Image: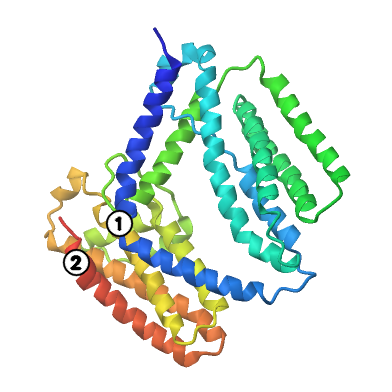
Amino acid sequence: MFDEHKLWKERLGTTSKELGKYFRYIFNGHIVLVLLFLIGTAAFYYQEWVKTLSPDFPVALIMAVLLAIVLTYSPIYTFFMEADRIFLLPLEDKLNFYFRKSIILSLILQIYILVVGLAVFMPMYAAVNNGNFKVFFPFLILLSLAKLVNMLIRWRVQYFVEKNVHNTDSFVRFCVNGVFLYFLFSNANILFFIPVVVIYIAIYRVYFKQSKKKGLKWEFLIDQEEKRMMSFYRLANLFTDVPKLKNSVKRRKYLDWISEKLPYHHNSVYTHIYVQTFIRGGDYFGLYLRLTVIGAAVLYWITFGYGQILFLVLFLFMTGFQLLPLWNHHQNKIWIRLYPVQESMKRKSFQKLLSIILIVQAVVLSIPIIFKGEVMTAGLAIAAGIVFSYMFVYVYSSKKLKN
C-alpha cells in the first residue's frame, strides 16, 4: 500500500543526511575562516558607507530591484530522483500531501534567505529614513506573503514544458515584485497596492486554469533536483572528494589560443590535460573569473593602505584552495594511466599551471590598486602574490596532492 507520508519522511531524511555528511567538511575547512574575515571586513566598510548616505539616496529603488530577484527565484524542492519518472508517475494523483510539504519546506528555507537579505539592506534603509528599524518585521511578513504567492505561481508554471512560458513568467513576476517592493519601501499609500494584489491573483488564476488539465512535467522536476544537487556537490568537492559529482564540459572557443600555444611534446601531456580541464571542465574557469572580478572590485573600493596586500593574498588563497580539486578531476579515468609518461610529470604540470594561474590573478588584482595611484602598494602586492603563490603551490598544496 502506497504511503505518501512515509515517502516524504524518507526523502527528507535521506537528503538531510546526504547534505549533513558534506556540511561537516565544508564548515571545518580553512576557507570558512577566510570568508568570515571577508564578511566581517565588508560589514565594517558597509557601515562606514551607510553613514555617508544622503536623504535623497534611492534606497527604495535599489532594495526593490535586488529583493525582487530573491522573490522571483522561487525553487520548490521535491527531492525527486531519476527512477521516479517510472515508479511515481502513475501515482501523481496521490501525492497532494507530498507536494504541499515540498512547498511548505521550500517556503521556510527561502524565508530564511529573505531574512538575511532584508537584514543586509535595513541599515541602508534606516539611514535614509531616520533610523527606523521598527518596520523590519512588517516588511518581513509582507515579503513572506509575496514569496508564498510567487511559489504557488511557480508551481503551476512547472506544468508547462515550453521554455518561453517559464521565461515569460519569471520576467512578469520580476516586474510585479519590483513594483510591489518599490511601493512598500517608498511608504506608498495602501491604495497603490490594490492593483498589484489584483495582478498577483490574475497571474495565478491564468496559470491555474491553463494547467488544470495538464500533468506534472516529471523530467523537468527531476532535472531541476539534479542540477541543485550537482551545484551542492561542486561546492562540497572543494573540501572533500564527492563520488556522485557529475562534471560538465563547456566549450570556450575564445580561449582556444591558450591551448594552441602549448608545446606538443610527450612531457606536456598532463599540461594539455589540466589546461583543457581548467578551461572547459566543471566550473573551474568560471569560479576563477568570478573570484578575480569580485576581488578586483573589493580592492578598488576599499581604502585600507597596505592592508590591501592582505586582501589580495586572501583572494589568492580562496582561488588556489578551490582549484585544488582539479588535481583529482581525472582520477577515475583508467586510460590516463596508460600514457607512457612518468607519473612525476603529472605533479609538475599541475603545480606549474596552478602557480601561473595564481600569479596572473595577483597581477590582475593589483591593477585596481594602480588605478587609485598607489603604485608602491601595487608593486608590493604583486611581489607578495608571487611569494604566496610559490608557497601555496609547492609547500601547502604539495601535502594534499596524492596520486
Q: Where does the image place residue 24, in percent across and percent down from the top left?
A: 30, 49
Residue 98: x %, y % from top left: 50, 22
In this view, the residue in front, 211 or 93, is 93
Q: Residue furthest top?
A: 1
Residue 360 visible at all: no
The amino acid sitting under disc 1 is Asn
Q: Is residue 132 above or below residue 233?
A: below
Query: Could one spot residue 204 in this view of the protein?
Result: yes
Give whichever of discs 1 and 2 has the lower sequence position: 1
Q: Quadrant of residue 388?
A: bottom left
Residue 28 is tagged as 1
Q: Is residue 87 left or right of residue 338?
A: right
Q: Mark 1 against mark 2, which lies toward the viewer?
A: 1
Q: Cβ–Cβ below 8 Å for labels 1 and 2?
A: no
Residue 398, numbered label: 2
Q: Give coordinates of residue 274: x percent, y percent.
A: 29, 58
Q: Is residue 197 above or below residue 231?
A: above
Left or right: where does residue 12 sit relative to residue 159?
Answer: left
Q: Is residue 188 above or below residue 41?
A: above
Residue at 12%, 54% (x, y): give it: 340
At a point 46% along the width and 55% down the height, the residue shown is 252
- Name the quarter where the N terminus is drawn: top left
Instruction: Give the amino acid at mark 2.
Output: Ser
Mark 1–mark 2 distance (CA, rounded to whole Å): 20 Å
